[in-house]
Image: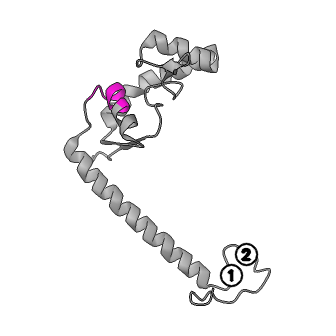
């Protein structure tokens, strides 16, 4: 069975921080630790919900690291912090990452091309997508005479 590549998109710290902020009592957190995370999440969400959240984040981390093929982050700082606390400064499969990014780019280009084609087709129809009941007759769209 072929493994499906998993590209993780880091937009916050939720892969290793139960509160997603990496802040503890108003100051930057030094990183995940079991007791510290339980207390912090308990303060943030309330005792039972915070504890369950902290345990869930801690238990899902090894599975995520094992399954991920690449990491895409919203900024260089988030990338650095995520690699440090999630991967332990290790980088996910380097060869697989390049191949995965090339595939992701081609899928994105195909999706954009399909979206443009669909938009043009719908705009040229008399049944306008923003007027689904055709309440007012619309003339076909002419790009030279908007």
Q: Is residue 140 above or below residue 76?
A: below
User: Magenta includes 115?
Assistant: no
Q: Residue furthest top?
A: 35
Q: Residue at x 31, y 32 (%)?
A: 66
Q: Main secondary structure of the magenta part?
A: helix
Q: Is residue 72 above or below residue 143?
A: above
> Tag on residue 127?
1
In the picture, measured across the screen, residue 43 lies left or right of residue 55, that is right
Q: Residue furthest right?
A: 135
Q: Residue furthest left?
A: 95
Q: Residue at x 25, y 35 (%)?
A: 91
Magenta residue span: 81-89
> Tag on residue 131?
2
Q: Is residue 136 visible?
A: yes
Can you give x and y, in whole percent of width and height, for residue 25 in the image? 55, 15
Can you give x and y, in whole percent of width and height, for residue 100 in the image? 29, 51
In the structure shown, which secondary structural element does the residue marked by tag 1 occupy? loop
State how far apart marks 1 and 2 are (Cα). 7 Å
Can you give x and y, in whole percent of width and height, for residue 50 in the image? 58, 19
**Dot 1 crowding, Cα within 10 Å, few <14, some 14–19, many 20+:** some
> Is mark 1 in CB contact (under 8 Å) with mark 2?
yes
Q: Is residue 95 above or below residue 115?
A: above
Q: Is residue 16 above or below residue 6?
A: above
Can you give x and y, in whole percent of width and height, for residue 138 in the image? 72, 86
> Tag on residue 19?
none
């Amino acid at each position: 069975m072929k493994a499906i590549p998993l590209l993780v998109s880091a937009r916050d710290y939720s892969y290793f921080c139960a509160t997603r902020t990496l802040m503890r009592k108003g100051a930057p957190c030094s990183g995940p630790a079991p007791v510290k995370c339980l207390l912090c999440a308990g303060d943030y969400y309330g005792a039972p919900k915070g504890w369950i959240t902290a345990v869930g984040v801690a238990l899902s981390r090894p599975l995520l690291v094992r399954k991920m093929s690449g990491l895409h982050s919203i900024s260089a700082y988030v990338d650095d912090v995520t690699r440090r606390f999630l991967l332990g400064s290790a980088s996910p499969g380097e060869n697989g990452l390049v191949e995965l990014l090339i595939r992701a780019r081609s899928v994105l280009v195909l999706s954009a091309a399909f979206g443009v084609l669909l938009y043009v087709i719908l705009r040229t129809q008399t049944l306008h997508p923003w007027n689904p009941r055709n309440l007012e007759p619309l003339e076909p769209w002419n790009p030279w005479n908007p």
